[in-house]
Amino acid sequence: ILELPRENEEFSSDNKEEPKIQEHEELRLRTYFSSDKQLKKVSGGELKKQEFSLTEATHDKQFWLSASLKSGHSEDESHPGIISEFNAIKTQYIMQNILPYMCIIAVRNEGENVLNGMLKNGVGTLDFCVRLYPDQEVVSAKMIKTFKQRGSPTYGIISKVAVHKSARQQGVASLMLKLVIEFANQKGISQIFLQVHRRNKPAQALFGKMGFTITDARVTPLQEKPNMYTCSLDL
């Protein structure tokens, strides 16, 4: 969940208007909700906007890139914070058919967008997971399913938004958030939640710009945390 930004993190709060992701554009993410609300898999891909590309992390090197951005220690590959984040991302990715999850990374478009370039030019990341509301969620003893029935209402959680210091105030966080919001809206997710530190004014300004409002955590599926605001967006 969002905390105070580290030195390499930035939440853009500028008022610069960014082009809306059009409905006809294919958000070719690896996982998506089909019409029956069951998770299906499609081929991976990227969404390109302006000078940045967004894609879903699907392998170890991309997980490591995301982990280094989230931990705030991208200069020290042996830092335990990176290892901890990497393990968390990989575990959630492996379990995504049970607990739907995706990790988005933003890459600066410089030259060919091959893997090495992606790792060198990675500037942003966030996590997005999808859950059933508590009274709808049933998990079998063998952890085979999370969904109780077709059409059960779902909500999304955005967390661990991080942007490298070299890409501050360039709309990277806004672009990642817009992708997730458009994706969730198209797939029938009813609400998105996130949490942000009460002193993190830039993040609050950005989320307000994206349509999020501060909500009493006690009436949401999220656990209330000290010094944190819970924000929600109805879709």
Image (cartoon, rainbow, N blue to C red):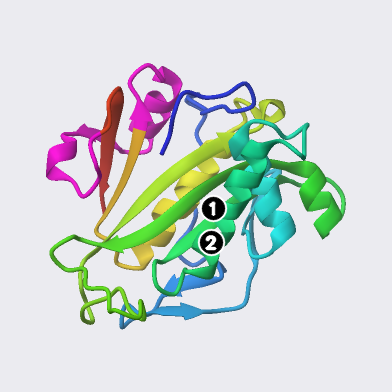
Q: Residue at x 37, y 65 (%)?
A: 186
User: Is 126 drawn above or below residue 155 in the view shown?
Assistant: above
Q: Magenta residues?
A: 196-224
Left or right position of 7 against 231: right
Quarter-of-image position of residue 47: bottom right
x and y percentages locating residue 13 in the rendered image: 47, 24
Task: Name the foreground residue: 80 vs 44.
Answer: 80
Q: Amino acid at mark 2?
A: Thr
Left or right position of 181 against 5: left
| Circle 2 crowding by C-alpha within 10 Å: few under 14, some 14–19, many from 20 | few
x and y percentages locating residue 50 in the rendered image: 66, 45
Task: Name the foreground residue: 55 vs 135.
Answer: 135
Quadrant of the image for the C terminus?
bottom left
x and y percentages locating residue 170 in the rendered image: 62, 30
217 falls in the magenta region:
yes
Left or right position of 192 against 113: left
Tag 1 near tag 2, CB within 8 Å: yes
Q: Which residue is mark 2?
A: 91
219 falls in the magenta region:
yes
Could you tell me how far apart the alpha carbons at marks 1 and 2 are, in whole angstroms? 5 Å
Q: Amino acid at mark 1?
A: Ala
Q: Residue at x 46, y 62 (%)?
A: 101
Task: Name the foreground residue: 199 vs 202.
Answer: 199
Residue 231: mark: none
Q: Residue at x 49, y 67 (%)?
A: 24
User: Is 176 drawn above or below residue 23 in the view shown?
Assistant: above
Residue 28 seen anywhere in this rendered image of the structure:
yes
Residue 88: mark: 1
Left or right position of 84 against 33: right
